[in-house]
Amino acid sequence: MFNSNSLKQFAELYRYLIMVLALHAPVIWGILLLNIRGVKLTGHSAVYFNSVALGYYMLPLLLVVTLLFILLFPFGRALMWLVGIVMVIFTYILLLDSFVYEVCKLHIDLFWLEFLFKDYRGFGLTAPAFLSVLAALVVLILVELGIFTLARRKRAPLPVILLLIALFVVSFGFSQVAHIVAYENNYASITSLTPRFPFYVPFTSHSNAAKLSKWMPMGESDLTSEMPDPEPTNLTFPLSEMRFTGDSVKNPPNILLILLESWRFDAMSKEVTPNIMAFADSSIVFRQHLSSGNSTIGGIFGLFYGIEPTYWAAVKANNILIDNPPLIDVLGDRGYALGIFADSSFKRHKIKDTVFRGIEVVEEFEGRNIPQKDADLASRLRQFMCDQSEANNPFFAFAFFKSSHNGYNYPKEHDIFQPSRNMNLAFVDSKNRESYKNDYLNSVHYSDALVGELLAEVKSLGEMDNTVILITTDHGDSFNDNDANYWGHGSNFTRFQVQVPLIIHYPGQAPREIHERTSHIDISPTLLQETFGCITDIHDYSNGYNLFGDLGEPRPFIVTSYVNHAFIFDDDVFAIYPTFTKKYKFHDVNLDVSAPQPAMLKQAMERINRFYD
């Protein structure tokens, strides 16, 4: 049992630890300032930055210190040492992250640290710069000793301690509500800071944003007047003005872009996709094509922007300043009618604001289920093409069919691959792998029938020789292909989730197969050059290549998921996480890899940094 003296010692020790924690706040605040160097903070963004620093970073430390105190308070000296070690490690990681972010424009992970420490000169770093980072550790240790000494001399009264705890909690709540409102309403003065914070995963809530906006003390008119200039965003895209040949506006062709959700490379065959296969016989088929994501966002972003998907966070945060990708801007400038039909959550995922800003996206369709809605999507798109053809307007038509998404939906007449069984990701059974995959193939077979209707419509309108047609997907799907219990998508970067079909019908281009490895980021620059006569250096607006030209030397492929990204060097995959790097073969997640070539590493770093100041 505690007596009065022990309770007093208990309280005094906790007050001491909270004082230590409070004295770290200026240190952490100063380190986070390094990540926003060059940014001109507005009034709203300054409040947001400080609330993130005090809430998102200080509140977890408060919880860790409190937990350590509860577990170790009888062992005061050991507790002090452990808290000191935690603080040094935490502040040093933040400091190291600011250094890595300055170099790589990505937050700290062991992949780049490994090679930075092995060959820092290869990344353009000088020995003094490298040694200064190591010296910073010594400085932080000395600062830590000073903080513990000062905390012992300056004991805060209990009301101040309680006020500090409340400040951390309130700051966390305020910062997250502010982000929800800013994210939903595209307030760049706030969202442009988000990619700069290390290990920062703020809340978003499409359903609650409108309600929170009513009482959050910020308004669109206030924030618009404080919108940051393009320069402080640290993102320059494109690098130079987009220029085109003078005759590029004459007789522009129509463009039809069709996506089948989750369509993996081996789900394209005469049995599964008979209509697409018949179309492929007179088209260009890319046999080693990679999506830029193993999830929808990464795949769609890379396809339309033509840059590495690691730029997604920065582009999303600054979408007001960028507006839309160059391809969409050119379509608007050329007077194209835009028909965007997507049975997907483009608005919720911010794809609409980032890719189709100011453009109507049809996401609501008639029907009781997904197959019926996809059928309505196809019907509306056929009518759109018919209307534009009759009016002699060039059109860009985009169809994104949902039936082959996980859950796999199709009418009974398409249940042709047997046995088939609906997959519940919560209760998947490896014994039924082929049954699950058959269910998936049936859904792809149904989507293929809808694609056949669209292709037939183009032909009946007499537009086949005046229409560029691309058929692909956002990503693939796994069915425990390597017996490692991976299902669906967004979970690894093997070929089953990343390698996808790409078929292009381009008037004037001979049918053929291309076996060099290509990427979604090649599609946009190809259209800009071949269709619109873009003469700007391709490196100024894309990380990709012209699919009909020289595909260049072997290159790294960068793919993103919901939460991380990976580098693919030939057949080696390096999946990047904040605290570790998972390495495996592109064709088998169970096989290990060798170290990447330095030249490939340098090329990867250049690609992910090209459009940052």
Image (spheres, rainbow, N blue to C red):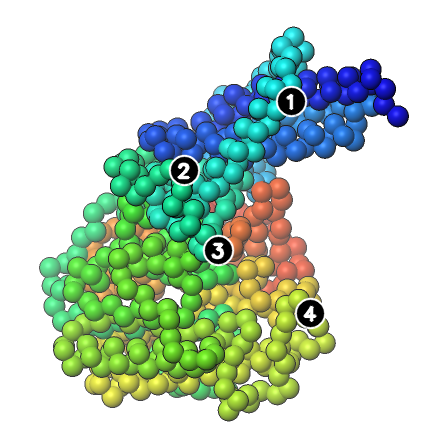
On screen, 438 above or below 106? below
| Left or right of residue 191: residue 560 | right
Q: Earlier in the sequence, mark 2 or mark 1?
A: 1
On screen, 40 above or below 585? above
Mark-to-mark CA distance, 2 and 4: 40 Å
Q: Which residue is mark 3?
A: 559
Residue 113 appears at what percent x and percent y?
56, 37
**Mark 1 element type:** helix
Q: Which residue is mark 4?
A: 427
Asked which quadrant contains residue 233, the reply is top left
Residue 198 appears at what percent x and percent y?
51, 37
Q: Earlier in the sequence, mark 2 or mark 4?
A: 2
Residue at point 17% right, 69% down? 252
Q: Are marks 2 and 1 in contact (CB under 8 Å)?
A: no
Mark-to-mark CA distance, 4 and 1: 45 Å
Q: Which residue is mark 1?
A: 18
Mark-to-mark CA distance, 2 and 3: 23 Å
Q: Is residue 434 visible?
A: yes
Q: Earlier in the sequence, mark 1 or mark 3?
A: 1
**Kind of residue at badge 3:** Val
Report the front residue among 197 and 289: 197
**Kind of residue at badge 1:** Ile
Q: Earlier in the sequence, mark 2 or mark 3?
A: 2
Task: Please identify, in this view, whether the residue under mark 1 or under mark 3 is nearer the observer.
Answer: 1
Residue 281 appears at what percent x and percent y?
37, 83
**Mark 3 element type:** strand
